[in-house]
Image: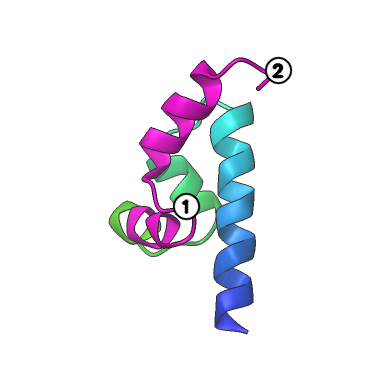
Amino acid sequence: MTQFVRQTKVETAKELLIASNLSLIEIAELLSFSTATYFVKTFKKVPGVTPNHFRKHFISRPLDD
């Protein structure tokens, strides 16, 4: 169950990172992570990259890839 909740939060975080200009702190708070640091650690476990890296590289990629 914990893994499902973590996966769901990370998927929601990915959407927020792509579709909004919310800071990592705001996303962490919105998704009920205890701290932004814990959010970053948890996020990194799923896709293998930090939220900042994900946001930077997803947004900079052409849509036709």
Residue 44: within the magenta?
yes
Q: Where is residue 53 in the image (x, y as percent from the top left)?
A: 38, 35
54 vs 32, nearest the viewer:
54
Name the amino acid type tagged 1.
Glu
Q: Which residue lies furthest to the right in this view?
A: 64
Q: Residue 43 carries which label?
A: none
Label 2, on which residue? 64
Q: Which residue lies furthest to the bottom in this view?
A: 1
Circle 1 packing at 10 Å, graded few (<14), some (14-19), many (20+), is: some
For numbered disc 2, what is the local secondary structure?
Answer: loop
The segment highlighted magenta reads 40-65
Residue 19: within the magenta?
no
Looking at the picture, does residue 28 appear above or below residue 2? Answer: above
Q: Position of residue 52 (x, y in %)?
A: 38, 35
Q: Position of residue 63 (x, y in %)?
A: 68, 18
Secondary structure that dominates the magenta span = helix
For numbered disc 1, what is the local secondary structure?
Answer: helix
Label 1, on which residue? 29
Quarter of the image for residue 51 reads top left
Looking at the picture, does residue 36 appear above or below residue 63? Answer: below
Instruction: Indicate which disc, 2 or 1, sits on the residue closer to the N terminus.
Output: 1
Q: Which residue is drawn at 64% across and 40% down?
A: 15
Q: Where is residue 60 in the image (x, y as percent from the top left)?
A: 50, 17
Q: Which residue is drawn at 52% across and 25% down?
A: 21
Circle 2 packing at 10 Å, graded few (<14), some (14-19), many (20+), is: few
Q: Residue furthest front?
A: 65
For the C terminus, the image quarter is: top right
Disc count in the image? Answer: 2
Q: How is the image coloured?
A: rainbow
